[in-house]
Image (cartoon, coloured by chain):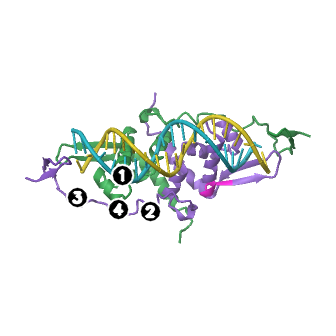
Chain colours: A green, B purple, C yellow, D cyan
Amino acid sequence: MVSFVVSDGSTMPVRPQSHNQAQTDYPLSKRSYLIAMNTSKSPANSLTAAAIVENVIKCKWSLTVFRLVREGVNRPGAMERAVPGLTTKVLNERLLKFVRFGVFERREFAELPPRVEYSLTAFGQKFAGVLDAVDSLQKELPSTD
Amino acid sequence: MVSFVVSDGSTMPVRPQSHNQAQTDYPLSKRSYLIAMNTSKSPANSLTAAAIVENVIKCKWSLTVFRLVREGVNRPGAMERAVPGLTTKVLNERLLKFVRFGVFERREFAELPPRVEYSLTAFGQKFAGVLDAVDSLQKELPSTD
DNA sequence: CCGTATCCCATAAGATACTG
DNA sequence: CAGTATCTTATGGGATACGG
C-alpha cells in the first residue's frame, strides 16, 4: 500500500482519492497571479486593474475617500470634517495615491484662502463601477434585522 | 477687506469665492461613512458589503487567493505552489477570513493524507461580481504596449 | 486652507519550525 | 497535506506640529 512520510519519520497510509491525481497534477500553473500584485510606484498604465484596485483600496479609508469625492465632497477640509477619525495625513496619502493612479484629478484655485478640489477622472468614473458592484453586494447580505 | 489668520500670526487677504460659502456649508453631513468601516470580528450578516470587501480585500494576497479558489485551485498546498511568494501563514490567514465572512466554504475529507478543499459559497459567487467589475476595469486602462 | 514631516504604536507579513 | 506558533521586519495609521 502507498504510504505518506510524515515529518517525524513515521508514515501515514494513503487511501487513493477518486481521481488519485499526482501532486503535480493541478489545474492551474503559476500563471501571472503575481505579475500585477506588486506594490510598485509606477502609474496606472503599467499595472493591471486588479493591482490598482489593491493599491488604492487596501487602506482603511480608501473607499470612504472615494465615495466622498464621488458624491461631491471634494475639498480636503470638507472631507476631514465630514468624516470623524479621518486625519490630514491619511487623507493626503489617499488623495495622492488616487491622483497618482489616475483616479482623481486635482484642481488648484489661485485664491486666498487657498482652494483645492478633487474630482473623478474619466478612468475614475469607471473605477466607480467597482464600488457599484460592492453596493449591489449589499442586497445579497442576509438581513440585519 | 476680509483677512485670513495664518498660524504664524500674520494674515492673508481673502478674495471672496464665487459663492463664498461659509465653512459650515458643505454638501454632506458626516453621515454614516464610518459605521461600516469598523474592523469588527463579527460575521458577514452584521456588516455592510463595503466593510466585508475592505476586511477581506485589504491584504496583499486577498484577490489572488480569491481568484485561485474561484478558478478551482482550492487546496491549500496547490495554492501555495501555484503562487510563488505566498506563504502558509498568510494563506491560512486569508482562508480563515474568507470562511469567517461566509465567502468561502471549507470541506474536509477523511483521507490520508488529509485533504481540504475550499469553494465559494452562494454569497461568494456574488462576491465574485466585484472582481468582475475589477476585470472590466482592465479594458479601460491605457494600453501597456 | 492645503499640505508635509515626525514620532509612536498597531497591524501586516515573510521566514521558520513544529503538530496532527 | 493541513494548520498553528513564534520571531522579526516592514508598513499602516493616529497625533501633533509646522510651513506655504
Q: Which chain carries label 4?
A: B
- Disc 3 residue type (three-letter): Gln
**Residue most extreme to the left:** B1
* Circle nearer the viewer, 4 or 1: 1
* SS at circle 1: loop
Decide whether residue A135 is among the magenta residues.
Answer: no
Left or right: where B33 falls relative to A50: left
Q: What kind of element bears circle 2?
A: loop
N-term-proximal mark, 2 vs 4: 4
Looking at marks 3 and 2 on the same chain, the residue that comes earlier in the sequence is marked by 3
Task: Say which mark, if any, is on residue B23.
Answer: 3
| Tag of residue B35 | 2
Q: Are marks 2 and 4 on the same chain?
A: yes
Please give the label number shown on residue B30. Answer: 4
The CA span between labels 4 and 1 is: 14 Å
Question: Residue beneath label 1, please?
Answer: A87
Secondary structure beneath dot 4 equals loop
